[in-house]
Amino acid sequence: MTTSTPHTTPRGDGADHTVAEIAQQPAVWREIGAALAGARAGLDAFLGPLLAEKDLRIVLTGAGTSAFAGEVVRAALARTTGRRVDAVSTTDIVADPYACFPEDVPTLLVSFARSGDSPESVAATRLAEQVLHRVHHLVVTCNSDGHLARTHREHTASHVLLLPAAANDRGFAMTSSFTGMVAACLLAFGALGTDDVEAAAAAAEHVTAGGLDRAIDTLLARRPERLVYLGSSSALKGLAQESALKLLELTGGALVAASESALGFRHGPKSVLNARTAVVVYVSNDPYTRRYDLDILTELRAGLAPGSVVAVSASPDGLPGDGSWLLPGLAGADDATLALPAVITAQLLALRSSLAHGIRPDNPFPSGEVNRVVRGVTVHPLPG
C-alpha cells in the first residue's frame, strides 16, 4: 500500500496536512480494498480457524478515535461472524483488565492504532495475555515502525494489518487513519465488499468535491457555541462520539461538543441545548432504528431555531423539514459503511470551525497540553 498524500500549495493557515488527509480518504479506501483482496489468503489462514470456534470472543480495542473505530464496526462484525463482539477501550483494559476480560474464553483482540506508540496500545495486548489463557491479536495500524506493529509482527498468534503510509496522518487529528482502519477491519472480516468500498468512496467524493460546502457554511454562519451529534444504531453512535471528538480536538476545545443516541439524549443530555446549539443527527438506514432518528429530528426542529438541526442521511425518505445533508448511492448500505463518508461531514465542520476561531488545525495545541501521541501515562504492573 503506497498511497501518498496529495501535493498541495502551502495554505499558510496551518491546515495543509488536515485538508489533504480529509480529501484523500476515498483514494485510501480503494487502495486498502485492493491490497486486502491480494492479501486474502493470509488473512483467511489466520482468521478462519479462530472464527470456527463457537465460543470465540472478539474484542475491538483502541484509545480515543481508535476506540470509536471499534464502536463503528462492532455490530457489523457480529452479524458477519456470528460471534460475540465487544468494543472495549485500551484505557479501560489497562485500568481494569479483569473487568474487561471477565471470562477466560478464546479471544481475538483487534487493536486499532494510528501510531501504535501510545503507552496503552502494547500494554493492553500484554495484559490480555496475562489474564487469558488463549488470546490472538489482529493489529490494524498505520505505522509499520510503531511499537505495537514491531511487537506483534513476528508472533505466531498475531497478524499485523498495515494500512497505506498516507493513512498515518501527519495532522494532529485522526482523519484518514480513522476511516482507513474502519474500512480495513470491515474488509478483513468480510463485512465490506469491493462494491461497498466503491459506493462509500463515491459518496465521500461528493462531499470532498464540495457537494455539501454551502450547507456546512450555512450551519457555521449561525456561529454555534455548542454542537451535538446524535446517532442511534451502534455504528452511528460510535460515529457521533468520533464526530464530537474531532470538533473538540481541531478547535482546541473552543467549541463544546457532545454526543448521544436519539433516545438517550432526552434523559438528561438534552440539557446542553440553548439558542447557540447546533445538532447533527446521523440517520440510520435500518428501517426500525430510523424511526427514532426521525422522531428526534421532528422534536428538535420544533424547539430550536430554523437551520440549527441537520440530518445526515443516505435517503430523503421521511426526513422532516429542510436541512438534510444527503449522501448519494448508500440508501441500502449498512450503517458501518454509511459512517465512512458521513464522518467526512464532521471532519469538515471541525476543520472550518477551527479556522474560523483562528486555530491551526494541524497543531491546535502548540503549547503541548494535548499531544498527537499520548504522553505521561505510567503503566503499572499487574499484581499476581
Image (cartoon, grey):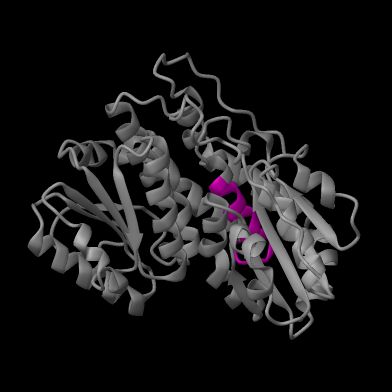
* Residue 97 locus on image (x, y percent): 68, 68
Tell me if residue 180 is in the magenta stretch: yes
> What residue range appears in magenta?
178-192
In percent of the image, x 63 and y 43: which residue is there? 114
| Magenta region, main secondary structure | helix
Using residue 296 as the reference point, say whether residue 135 is left or right of it: right
Decide if residue 291 is on the left or right side of residue 55: left
Above or below residue 3? Residue 197 is: below
Q: Depth check: give the residue in front, 224 or 78.
A: 224
Q: Which quadrant would residue 270 be assigned to in this image?
A: bottom left
Note whether 293 is above or below 211 in the view shown.
below
- Residue farthest toward the bottom in the current orientation of the protein: 54
Residue 47 appears anywhere in the view: no
Q: Is residue 366 visible?
A: yes
Q: Residue at x 73, y 55 (%)?
A: 123
Image quarter (top left, top right, bottom left or bottom right) of the C terminus = bottom right
Q: Position of residue 259 (x, y in %)?
A: 35, 59
Residue 241 position, x and y percent, is 42, 57
Residue 48 on the magenta span: no
Q: Is residue 162 left or right of residue 168?
A: right
Please indicate whether residue 281 sits to the left or right of residue 56 in the image: left
Q: Quadrant of residue 320?
A: bottom left
Q: Nearer the viewer, residue 315 or 215?
A: 215
The N terminus - image quarter:
top right
Front-most of 353 and 327?
Answer: 353
Q: Is residue 260 above or below residue 80?
A: above
